């Protein structure tokens, strides 16, 4: 078999010999032909191959019969050929292989000499049947076909099949190799252009008009009695990326009828060494790990083709790191290989691909990861399960601040309402807990302690389910999971990302546990500490409620004095955990009603705890009710109306800073005022905070520094950023509230509106998942420009749920933001996305 690859191209535009001197291009001949061309170019032994062009196949389908004689001229007088599809893009699919083209009465003795008379007859029988079915869409068979036939019986059956072909098709079985090849080309062109094939390409993201080339190869026949064997090999474990050379039996080109290759037959040591060398050569040439398909003739190995190996994200990262270490690619190329969002699978457990659990509900993939546990409908029920060391899934129609304790305990969260920026989604991502929000196909009956599917299946409290927050589905029972893989290769990979990026990455963290996670994942500080989450612990919630129900400022101060040491301890822990790193603390933001009991029993318990009558408590609760509390007395409005709250929080921050400083810990507290709309609000709060700072400096004898900034969450604040910057050293943009106030859409109810709007083309994408550059983005750019006109050294940041997405990070760099802040488990994603944005910009600029 001539494999020198020295022949020039065929003297026709329809086909080309795959040779080292002129490699076929994917544009003209398809990806498979181009890959075989690369093999020949690298000096790797391949069967003699001719590539048929995409134009020639298209013309064949259009009615212009292809002249196949130039193709056949490149092979032996009695060739046995395979014809494989070579689409322009391999990922858009293909047409089934045509084997044994050229096998006829004249070629049968030659084949019999190579693989044995009986096996050659079996191959001929299969070829006749396949040709009738694929070319003429006629099924033929022989009634005497039996397993274990003798050679004579096989000869008789071949004759019967040829007669059956003539009778059912109406012509003799073609004995001409050119006629068989022409029929194969015509059939494959027809199959490629079937409506179903076009639809499949479209579903895979390709045009239905994508072209098809063909690859005609000489079949590799084993000289021993084993027949023809096709093998596959790979050099790594596709799950881990670690070195793990494997060889297995691939397609049996000679079918089950004549297959004699035992899957347990091992390759000779010489072949294995050769294959390892081929893998290494291709790895260096292609800068990736590949899968080989090859055949042997009993003496030598012939590579048929290769494909890029489909790998897990962990394997992709490890391969990229090892390619850099081997000098095959540089660090920047390695960083650009991985989709940042795919890193999520390395940070959380994932449902195993082998899981076959039934899907009982679908919703929004609000927080990635997978967890199994017993259904519970309340935080108290989650407490009970935790006391028994039993895992649970917290199921709520929607969550609120009162559910945070339960979310800390539960292994997963399921809600019937809400979207990507709902309370459940935001908190779950911060905690690293898998969450499916806005579940459909299921009804929530918390009063009855049951979930009911559309099929009528009932799941009661205590039944086990699995939350797959990566796919956005709920599974029946406990599904098998794969552990996270944040290993050495991933850490090395992200260290390279840090060297390339120019945008800071902080984390939204409210607790010590969240800070530890954020630091582990490479956060450079805390960009948003939501102090309200510190008050929902049982030991503090009663005191907080006591403060809310106080009838005079003096009584309110008494309650706040109880909360002061608790807050001081929280902040001291944060400062100790983040020495020298910035900590941005947002003062109390939510309306007070979120801290109140939700039913009469809880009100009665609270009344007894704080020494008031149930009537007094009920009346006060009614006074605090608002028609739209999220646009009511909250944020800075609460701080101005009830100044004792912000005073206590500021004092706690400064006393913690003074104590940390006295212990030799470098602290950088940043105090952020939420929901600002007017500069006068900032002036009033700043005056109060500056006064508290002086009092603490005087009482402790410790000097400390702090920064005061504004959280820009309203369109008016964005428009008046120039005024706000006069009294604020930083502006942090909360895109969750800014988006919902710009659009006038509640983020908790957005899914039912936005999905339909995206489908109808009203919105190009969900503005709560992908930042709206035209509307919200313009407000951000105006704010940045006006703020920096007032204060050129203004620190700018973005801390909404958009923060870690690649699109938002690219926008943030363009808008000159200093950093973004995201959930702890999104920090690695943001680090990689920031590096990629910087690399692409530098490369675009030359």
Image (cartoon, grey):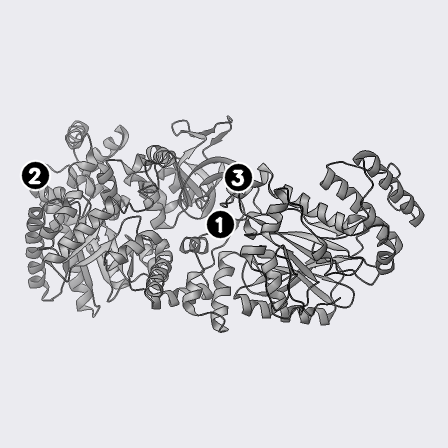
Q: Which residue is mark 3?
A: 477
Question: Could you say which is closer to the camera, residue 200 or residue 494?
Answer: 200
The answer to which image quadrant residue 157 occupies is: top right
The mark found on residue 552 in the picture is 2
Dot 2 crowding, Cα within 10 Å, few <14, some 14–19, many 20+: few
Q: Secondary structure at mark 2?
A: loop
- How many callouts does the rendering have? 3
Query: Which residue: 36% across, 65% down?
Result: 843
Task: Tell me if residue 357 comes above or below residue 488 in the rendering.
Answer: above
Residue at image point 86% right, 53% down: 106
In this rendered view, identify the residue nearer to me: 519 or 380: 519
Image position, residue 584 (x, y; %): 21, 56
- Residue at disc 3, secondary structure: loop
Residue 838 figure quarter: bottom left
Q: Residue at x 51, y 45 (%)?
A: 204
Q: As displayed, is residue 39 above or below residue 139?
A: below
Task: From this view, report whether residue 54 is shown above or below residue 792.
Answer: above
The x, y position of residue 520, in whole percent, is 36, 61
Secondary structure beneath label 1: strand
Name the image quarter holding the C terminus: bottom left
Alpha carbon separation for disc pair 2 and 1: 53 Å
Relative to 560, 191 lies left or right: right
């Amino acid at each position: 078999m001539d494999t020198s690859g020295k022949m020039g191209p065929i003297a026709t535009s329809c086909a080309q010999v795959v040779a080292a001197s002129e490699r076929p291009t994917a544009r003209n001949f398809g990806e498979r032909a181009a890959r075989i061309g690369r093999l020949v170019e690298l000096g790797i032994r391949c069967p003699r191959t001719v590539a048929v062009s995409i134009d020639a196949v298209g013309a064949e389908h259009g009615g212009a019969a292809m002249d196949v004689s130039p193709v056949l001229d490149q092979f032996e007088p009695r060739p046995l050929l395979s014809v494989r599809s070579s689409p322009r893009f391999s990922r858009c699919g293909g047409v089934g292989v045509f084997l044994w083209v050229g096998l006829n009465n004249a070629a049968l003795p030659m084949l019999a000499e190579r693989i044995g008379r009986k096996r050659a007859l079996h191959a001929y029988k299969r070829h006749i049947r396949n040709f009738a079915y694929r070319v003429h869409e006629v099924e033929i068979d022989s009634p005497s076909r039996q397993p274990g036939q003798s050679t004579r019986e096989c000869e008789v059956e071949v004759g019967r099949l040829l007669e059956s072909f003539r009778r059912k098709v109406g012509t003799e079985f073609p004995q001409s190799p050119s006629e068989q090849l022409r029929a194969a080309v015509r059939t494959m062109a027809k199959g490629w252009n079937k409506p179903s094939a076009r639809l499949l390409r479209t579903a895979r993201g390709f045009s239905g008009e994508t072209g098809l080339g063909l690859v005609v190869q000489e079949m590799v026949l084993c000289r021993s009695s084993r027949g023809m064997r096709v093998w596959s090999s790979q050099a790594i474990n596709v799950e881990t990326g670690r070195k793990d050379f494997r060889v297995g039996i691939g397609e049996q080109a000679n079918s089950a009828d004549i297959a004699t290759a035992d899957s347990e037959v091992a390759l000779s040591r010489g072949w294995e060494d050769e294959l390892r060398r081929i893998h290494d050569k291709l790895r260096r040439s292609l800068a990736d790990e590949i899968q080989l398909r090859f055949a042997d003739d009993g003496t030598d190995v012939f590579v048929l083709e290769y494909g890029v190996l489909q790998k897990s994200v962990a394997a992709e990262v490890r391969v990229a790191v090892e390619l850099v270490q081997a000098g095959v690619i540089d660090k920047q190329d390695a960083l650009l290989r991985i989709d940042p969002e795919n890193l999520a699978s390395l940070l959380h457990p994932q449902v195993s691909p082998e899981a076959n659990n039934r899907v009982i509900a679908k919703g929004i993939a609000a927080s990635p990861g997978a967890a199994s546990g017993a259904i519970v409908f309340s935080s108290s029920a989650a407490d009970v399960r935790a006391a028994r060391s039993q895992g649970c899934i917290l199921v709520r129609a929607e969550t609120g601040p009162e559910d945070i304790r339960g979310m800390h305990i539960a292994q997963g969260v399921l809600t019937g309402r809400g979207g990507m920026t709902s309370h459940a989604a935001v908190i779950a991502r911060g905690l690293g807990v898998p969450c499916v929000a806005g579940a459909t196909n299921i009804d929530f009956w918390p009063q009855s302690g049951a979930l009911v599917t559309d099929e009528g299946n009932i799941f009661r409290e205590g039944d086990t389910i699995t939350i797959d927050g990566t796919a956005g589905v709920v599974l029946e029972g406990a599904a098998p999971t794969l552990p996270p893989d944040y290993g050495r290769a991933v850490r090395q990979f992200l260290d390279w990302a840090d060297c390339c990026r120019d945008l800071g990455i902080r984390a939204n963290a409210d607790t010590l546990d969240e800070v530890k996670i954020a630091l582990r994942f490479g956060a450079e500080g805390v960009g948003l500490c939501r102090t309200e989450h510190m008050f929902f612990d049982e030991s503090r919630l009663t005191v907080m409620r006591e403060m809310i129900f106080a009838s005079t400022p003096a009584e309110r101060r008494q309650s706040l004095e109880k909360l002061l040491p608790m807050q001081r301890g929280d902040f001291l822990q944060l400062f100790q955990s983040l020495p020298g790193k910035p900590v941005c603390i947002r003062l109390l933001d939510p309306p007070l009603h979120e801290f109140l009991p939700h039913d009469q029993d809880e009100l009665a318990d609270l009344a007894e705890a704080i020494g008031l009558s149930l009537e007094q408590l009920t009346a006060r609760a009614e006074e605090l009710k608002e028609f739209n509390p999220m646009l009511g007395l909250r944020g800075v409005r609460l701080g101005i109306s009830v100044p004792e709250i912000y005073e206590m929080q500021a004092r706690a921050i400064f006393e913690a800073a003074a104590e940390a400083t006295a212990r030799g810990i470098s602290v950088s507290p940043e105090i952020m005022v939420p929901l600002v709309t007017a500069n006068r609000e900032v002036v009033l709060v700043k005056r109060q905070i500056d006064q508290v700072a002086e009092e603490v400096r005087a009482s402790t004898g410790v000097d400390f520094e702090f920064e005061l900034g504004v959280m820009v969450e309203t369109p008016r604040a964005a428009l008046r950023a120039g005024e706000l910057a006069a009294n604020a050293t930083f502006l942090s943009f909360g895109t969750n509230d800014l988006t919902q106030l710009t659009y006038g859409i509640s983020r908790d109810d957005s899914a039912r509106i936005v999905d339909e709007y995206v489908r109808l083309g009203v919105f190009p994408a969900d503005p709560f998942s992908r930042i709206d550059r035209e509307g919200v983005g313009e407000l951000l750019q105006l704010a940045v420009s006006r703020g920096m006109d007032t204060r050129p050294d203004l620190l700018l940041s973005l801390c909404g749920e958009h923060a870690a997405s690649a699109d938002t990070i690219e926008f943030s760099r363009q808008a000159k933001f200093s950093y973004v802040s995201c959930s702890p488990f999104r920090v690695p994603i943001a680090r990689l996305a920031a590096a990629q944005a910087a690399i692409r910009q530098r490369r675009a600029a030359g």
